[in-house]
Amino acid sequence: PPGIDAIELSRVVDRGIRESHSIDTKKLCIEKGEKIWMICIDIITINAAGNLIDAAGIASLAALKDAKFPKYEGGELDYETKTKEGIPLENDPLPVTVYKIGDNLFVDPLPEEEKAVDARLTVAVTVDGQLCAMQKGGGVPLSVEEIDKMIGIALQNAQEIRKAL
């Protein structure tokens, strides 16, 4: 079974996508009342070099944007033939995790820094700057002021990441 870190990773990424309502689930209907497309994303970590939550969220978003439906015609599904139709995606939820060590707040830590983290806050941000999900991790509580600062950092970094993508 997956470990606690893998479970948290999948839940944080899933929550950002679901709560942003970025996938119009009505458009996943194949035959009303009969068949729908089901979307699953498997995250397989090859190298955890720090900031895995954000990397997994960005990779999941890229996978959703790249995916094409298989051909479905006359009740038959052809997995070998892909259509030009992709997953109906909007809002592009981007996770940004802000970390805290002592009084310092920062993003994109190295693995060594992650081991020393007091707390972290992952904020999923839509393309229009709306917060759609948050997840707090780490054993140290955060004050309201710290959460506000972390959200501000996440919003700013989300804009910078979008420019780079």
Image (cartoon, grey):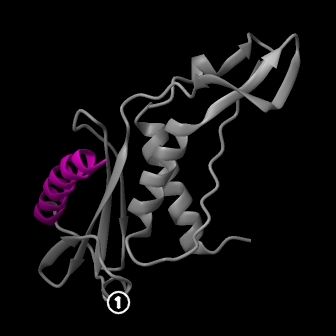
Position of 84 with respect to 18 (left or right) is right
Where 36 sits versus 101, above or below? above
Q: Mostly what secondary structure, the magenta segment?
A: helix
Residue under the point 54% across and 73% down: 5
Residue 160 falls inside the magenta stretch = yes
Instruction: Name the residue tied to disc 1.
Output: 112
Residue under the point 61% across and 22% down: 84
Give percent across and percent down for residue 1: 74, 71
Where 122 sits versus 104, above or below? above
Give percent across and percent down for residue 60: 51, 49
Give percent across and percent down for residue 40: 66, 44
Residue under the point 59% across and 17% down: 27
Amino acid type, label 1? Glu
Position of 138 with respect to 68 (left or right) is left
Position of 72 with respect to 119 (left or right) is right
Q: Which residues are magenta?
A: 145-165
